[in-house]
Image: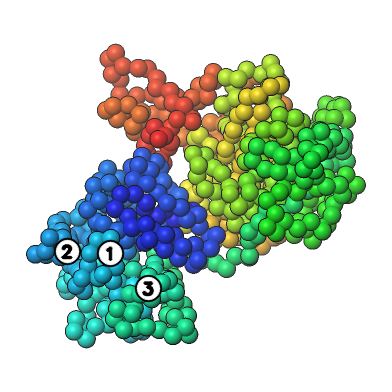
Amino acid sequence: MNVLVYSGPGVSETSLYCTISTLKDILGTSFAIQTVSPKVLETEPWAPTCALLVIPGGRDLPYLSALGPAMKTIATYVRKGGSYLGICAGAYFASGRIEWEMGTPLEVQGERPLKFFPGLSRGCMYPGFQYESENGARTVSVRMSDGRIRNGLYYNGGGEFILSNDTPNVTPLAFYDDSEKPNTVAAVSCRVEEGNAVLWHVHLEYPTTSELVKSAAARVFQTLSESDVTKVESERKEIMLESLRILRLKTSNPPEIPTNPLPQYICATEASKGMLEEIHTTLNTLIDQNLGLIDDSTDQFLLHDGATSSISQNNDDRRHLVFCKDGLPSPEVTPHFSISAYFSHLTQARKQYSSSPRSPLQCNIGEVLQYGEAVTSTQTLLERNIKTLEVLPAPILSLATYQLNGRGRGGNVWVSPLGCLQWSLLLRPPPQFPNSKLVFIQYLVGLAVVEACREVLGSIGERVVLKWPNDIYAKARGEKGEELRKIGGILVNTVFMAGGVRIIVGCGLNVLNEPPIFSISQLDPSLRASNQRLTMENMLAAIMVKFGRMWDEFVSEGSFEPFIDLYLDRWIHSDQLVTLDTVKPPLRVRIAGITPEHGLLRTVPEKYQPGGPQFIDLQPDGNSFDMMAGLIKTKQ
């Protein structure tokens, strides 16, 4: 799930930086914390995968203008169960009405549309505010609702929440600890139908250790000792954590994640050792003799013989490739993935299918594995190193436990915590394969994933389904009944070069993730009780075998036709009524299927229009599907 922090007109760059830093410090890798623009909030289907929307400090009026087109989407997101954190200007922005610096040249007043806090926000609480200045900045103390006093919090331009006895669904969280202004509310928690909002007029995001806060403290003679600073900083994070828990963000203590890429071990099953030798020989021809390595477009590669554990990549920008010709690497260097168990599952899964004889330099999909505990990105390593991409044979499977710079569709971030099965697969279709059919590969991969879930999990796996064009969802059972939760995504990159086309398929699938990230293992208690029924190794093996058989038939037939009925049975859109925002005015259409020629999403207008089109077909790479809103939009 994502935590989206607004970054657009009006935002304070300092507040933005501190907000992101504090959230990453507290949430770790439990969520993907990323900035979001007004355009994305307006046009993209961000809500289903958003755990929290944050509007940091800045200027309310530019927010009002820039976010105007997205206002309805934001309001709907929160009211339908989403979470909103507003800090200073973000708190004013989410109030029912604001009165700010009345009677001065800076005066701002008026109604605000979100009204998560339905009452009045009035400011400034303290005098001296100036835009682009720290002249009015200070540190303040607040009294929490349970009586705790928290000191040293940064203030600059914030106000107070005016509550009356009949203000509905609002709970004060903190009061300014100011004897001259007793019981003045500094923070509130608001219940907004099914969702929640927490609003702070104090800058909770600014670390007490920063020079900015220390300077503000000096203005009100609140200079703190080093030990006091440490205590106050801990209390600040504690308050932020409490706010996040109100917003239903659960945090965990994940294992320490490597910060640098680690060696990648290239291994093969016994039947595919010839392919492994060919890869080694081919890459050796690319070595720059002066440098002693492969100097490629994005990375430099050092080749090693033997499954050694002595290689360290601390502060080393080179990528180490270890060829394991005479045995697999020690489990000590691959603690989170058992290569031997994976190959064993792969062999067992493939036994149920007959296979054609192969030459020594051929292999089935999944039998040559390039594994690293931590890599930059499995997708980037294959796609953006042109020298190696041009000569590498296929298929090669690249797998990582942690991706340090993972890539998703449209530049999206894929969270890389433990338990996420993240892989990329290099494919080389035969020269005669029609390029017009390459678009179907993303559908084929998705179908292989859901079929593998049924293979591994039986009836439980039937709750894993497809969302057009390239997402994997699960039917989760919650307090409100069944709900769809995203558990994976697919990315397909196509590179045309000498010798034919190269396909790099990327997939991220939440298999064993702990909450708050939803994963396959949370579909049924039995999957948590047994550590053998569902593993990273048997799931990957099942996917590779399923996809391998589908790929062979797909290439042989030159068509997706053999799979279309099964694909439509596994997706969630059959006969679905949606609003099509790609035409003006927007049109209500019913989803009819996938066109067999070009893989377009076929829709039929709900109502007959004389002279209108019989079908409206949509490209998978040009459109996005907002399931929450029942809306298909042009991808910006």
Element under disc 2: strand
Crowding near pointer 2: few (<14 within 10 Å), some, many (20+)? many
Crowding near pointer 1: few (<14 within 10 Å), some, many (20+)? few
The residue that mark 2 highlights is 100
Q: Nearer the viewer, residue 329 or 471?
A: 329
Residue at screen point 70% across, 18% down: 431
Real-space Cα distance between discs 2 and 3?
A: 23 Å
Q: What colour scheme has been applied to the protein in the rendered image?
A: rainbow
Residue at screen point 47% across, 55% down: 33
Q: Earlier in the sequence, mark 2 or mark 3?
A: 2
**Label 2 vs label 3, nearer the camera:** 3
Question: Can residue 180 be seen?
Answer: yes
Real-space Cα distance between discs 3 and 1?
A: 13 Å
The residue that mark 1 highlights is 133
Residue at screen point 59% across, 34% down: 492
Q: Where is residue 329 in the image (x, y as percent from the top left)?
A: 83, 53
Where residue 213 is drawn, which disc sits there? 3
Element under disc 1: loop
